Image (spheres, rainbow, N blue to C red):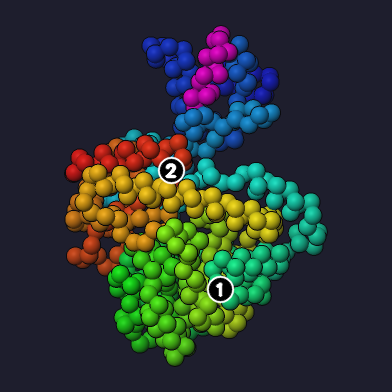
Amino acid sequence: MGIGHGGSGLDLHLELAKNAGGVGRALEAALREAMRSGRLAPGVLLPGSRSLAADLGLSRGTVVQVYAQLAAEGWLTGTPGSGTRVAGLPAGSTGEERGGEPEHDERTRTGLAADGPARRWEADLRPGRPDLSSFPRGAWASSVRRAVSMADAALFDYGEPAGVPPLRAAVADYVSRTRGARVTAGSVVITGGFSSGLALLARTFHRLGVRRAAVEDPCLRRHREMLCAAGLGLDPLTVDAEGADPSGLRDGTGVVLLTPAHQHPRGVVLAPARRAAFVEWARRGDGYLIEDDYDGEFRYDRQPVGALQALGPDRVVLGGTAGKALAPGMRIGWLVTPPALREPLLEVIEETSAAVPVIDQLALADLIARGDYDRHIRRLRLVYRRRRTELAERLATVTATPLEGVSAGLHALLPVDSADRERRLVAAGEDAGLRLHGLYTFGYWHAPSDRPAALVLGYASPPQHAWRRSLDLLTAVLQAGP
């Protein structure tokens, strides 16, 4: 059925299937198919409900109900005065549904079949992600408006590779105030998130003659890959209840990557004696430490532990990100660099054109300077603390195994009996529409062999309306005991 609509200037071709459970269900199915196939792309403005109803010969109420249902599922988005538009893919849908590249081929990574129809995920407990629905849209929009209207025109030119001065000053104040770091605006370098900063640092260290890096074991596989891509060999460091063990450092190692405030993924805090030992190693051997402070603001049982950088600002690169507090898609982070590394790092940034867009930088500077960033984090801290407590209480009803790690961050570790059981639980979660990560299934171990197995549960990820459902699915998967 061809539909011409002058109000939006859009022609739609929708086939309303007969026997689809009524005209409303038929319209839902037709619109879903058009969006899933890519014929209706994200951002496309749909006809108004009155116009579409007239074109199809349906009641306006039927069209309104269909739009509302698809909006609730994440297919559509509506803004007063702007009409109804096609949203991005609903949470958990893959790019393959619209003919694009999937963000990650998780079926391949878990060893599951890559064939078959694309899945619609009911719940997402992947770690390292905040609740995206919590993004402070109003405050961010206000900061963007102020940034654009009030900034000196010179700031919109090709900027300094280190980042715009207002954001470097705001970050310096924020990190000094909240993380106890020793930092000035001149030591801050703005990056496209921590991962981008790590890739730039790896290239910088290789250029300075470093050939080996030490990493925590377990750690994010992506970080290992970035270091290797820059030509650095890797030495794994055992992680126990006191964090990474410096006794495993080998001769020839020039840099160590650490997550001291909340080890990812095991959730332990680097003990004071080991902090001192790492800094002493760096000073004694002309080495450096990279401190990934990815979620240091989120400590729930007591005050957050201070940054390791304060013990050795001449030997520690402190990396932070707005991605865990705001959204990963922000792609804004920072490095607090020792003086000796600043110029070599800036040379690499210029060579790779890795600068962050100026307007985004200015908006974040405004958000921090006005206190909106702090207020947002305080709100999230209350939400995530409550979720972690609820997660622990719910798990206690189905397993005697407690969560590992301190009460902090956006994830917690649930040990399981074996790597095989971990893989079966992740697979069972997928069958139930629940996205799960595990130490083995997502490559956290440097060289997996008889290492502990566990689920890495990201309790911050689900939007608030889906949190209870996420807990229900998780407990059902664990009770089934595959």
**What is the crowding at mark 2: few (fewer than 14 residues within 10 Å), some, or many (at least 20)?**
many
- The residues tagged by marks 2 and 1 sit, at their Cα atoms, a distance apart of 32 Å
Out of 15 and 399, give the one closest to the viewer. 399
For label 2, the residue is 462
- Helix, strand, or loop for circle 1? loop
- Helix, strand, or loop for circle 2? loop
Image quarter in which the C terminus is found: top left
Mark 2 or mark 1: which is in front? 1
In the rendered view, does 26 fall on the left or right side of 370?
Answer: left
| Tally of marks | 2
Q: Position of residue 40 (x, y in %)?
A: 54, 30
Q: Position of residue 9 (x, y in %)?
A: 67, 24
Indicate which disc, 2 or 1, sits on the residue closer to the N terminus. 1
Q: Is residue 304 magenta?
A: no
Residue 309 in view of the camera: yes
In the rendered view, does 300 fall on the left or right side of 248?
Answer: right
- Residue at x 68%, y 59% (from the top left corner): 369
Quarter location, residue 356: bottom right
Residue type at mark 1 is: Ala
| Mark identifier at residue 181 | 1
Q: Is residue 373 above or below residue 33?
A: below
Residue 113 in view of the camera: no
Out of 10 and 303, give the one closest to the viewer. 303
In the rendered view, does 457 fall on the left or right side of 338?
Answer: left
- Residue at x 20%, y 40% (from the top left corner): 480
The secondary structure that dominates the magenta segment is helix
Magenta-drawn segment? 56-70
